[in-house]
Amino acid sequence: MLRLKARDGRAIDRRDFVRAAGASFLAALMPRPAAALANADAVFTSAYRAPDGSFGVATLTEAGEIVHAWRLPMRGHDVVAHHASGRCAAFARRPGTQGLAFDSAGGMKPQIFSAPAGRHFYGHGAFSADGRLLYATENDFDGVRGVVGIYDATDGYTRIGELPSHGLGPHEAMMMPDGRTLAIANGGIETHPDYGRAMLNLGAMKPSIAFVDCETGDLLARHDLPIEMSRLSTRHVDVGSDGRLWFGCQYQGEAGDVVPLIGHAGIGEPLAWLELPHEAGAALMNYVGAISVNRHSGLVAVTSPKGNAAVEFHPGAPGDARILRIKAVSGLAADGGGFAYSSMKGDFNGRARPQLWDNHIRRV
């Protein structure tokens, strides 16, 4: 292994060397972003609401220092990133119809793209393995079915087709490690933009987790929640280093009910629920705002803005779950061996900012 040395013979840490060289180069080109990046271990992206009421999306360090920021024509929800290419896309929250594509390094002029007539976004999406295609969860509201819109990231994010989500109300979708399978949390809730954010079928919800071939649209596997759990809307997903899909739910039943909120599933693997200690489960108040798996440490974390709490646990020892009390916490992403958190009240990883961060953050 190559080891670098200073003139006085001291060994130079490779990470420090790369950081110093990179920061020096960037400082000559983009002084303000470089200043924020010089001491950063990680960069994240998130949509936000500005103090003047406008909306935007930003990339920022784990210390909450903003590197780049762009205005959004709508309130954003989630942002997805393709790490190799730097491509990112922010989606409007339901029932918005616009998205913004940008480059995490700030080198590309942002592009607005839109869902077609008869469709709206659910706020989430995923890039193909090569970064050429963007998949967006959408509502065919007159057809009362969920779809996944396909957008060409190499051609101005032109919409070139769609896939069935094989369920109703698809919320978050994630590309699985094979690069061909989309995992989709179908929340099971019927909505229509004529009725705003009203839920139209609470008595007949059909939530599910579906695995779909993104090249053919074929259903590879679907896990339907049993009838007695039909009010448990599947919303957010993440995948661990072992390829297992974790999901978090939002309960649409009575506030006093005690229900499981977190589970895992796979193709050829039955849906299974995780049992948290009573205090940790109660802290979530029947609502998971986001879920993330740290693929280095194996830890899983969920947030609840309703409960003002985040819960971290290891799947092998859920009884040792840790509760973090953070007001209006929702966004989270793996960071080191743990997690970075953001709040809808402006906190980003422990730093108060004037921006109010939307529900999700992503590491880019």
Image (cartoon, rainbow, N blue to C red):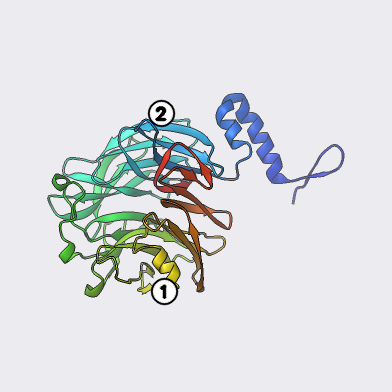
| Residue drawn where x is 71% and y is 40% of the image | 17
Q: On the picture, is 124 further left or further right than 167?
A: right
Q: Nearer the viewer, mark 1 or mark 2?
A: 1
Is residue 215 visible to the viewer in this orientation of the structure? no
Q: On the picture, is 51 further left or further right than 296?
A: left
**As displayed, is residue 336 above or below residue 101?**
below
Neighbour tally class for label 1: few under 14, some 14-19, many 20 plus, Cα within 10 Å: some
Where residue 227 appears, as percent x and y from the top left, is 22, 73
Q: Quadrant of residue 55?
A: top left
The residue carrying mark 1 is 275
| Residue drawn where x is 26% and y is 61% of the image | 218
Q: Name the foreground residue: 268 vs 141.
A: 141
Most extreme residue toward the top, as rendered? Answer: 28
What secondary structure is found at the residue carrying circle 1? loop
**As displayed, is residue 185 above or below residue 314?**
above
Q: CA distance from mark 1 to mark 2?
A: 46 Å
Is residue 266 visible to the viewer in this orientation of the structure? yes
Label annotation for residue 109? 2
Where residue 85 appears, as percent x and y from the top left, is 47, 41
Q: Name the foreground residue: 270 vs 327.
A: 327
Label 1 amino acid?
Glu
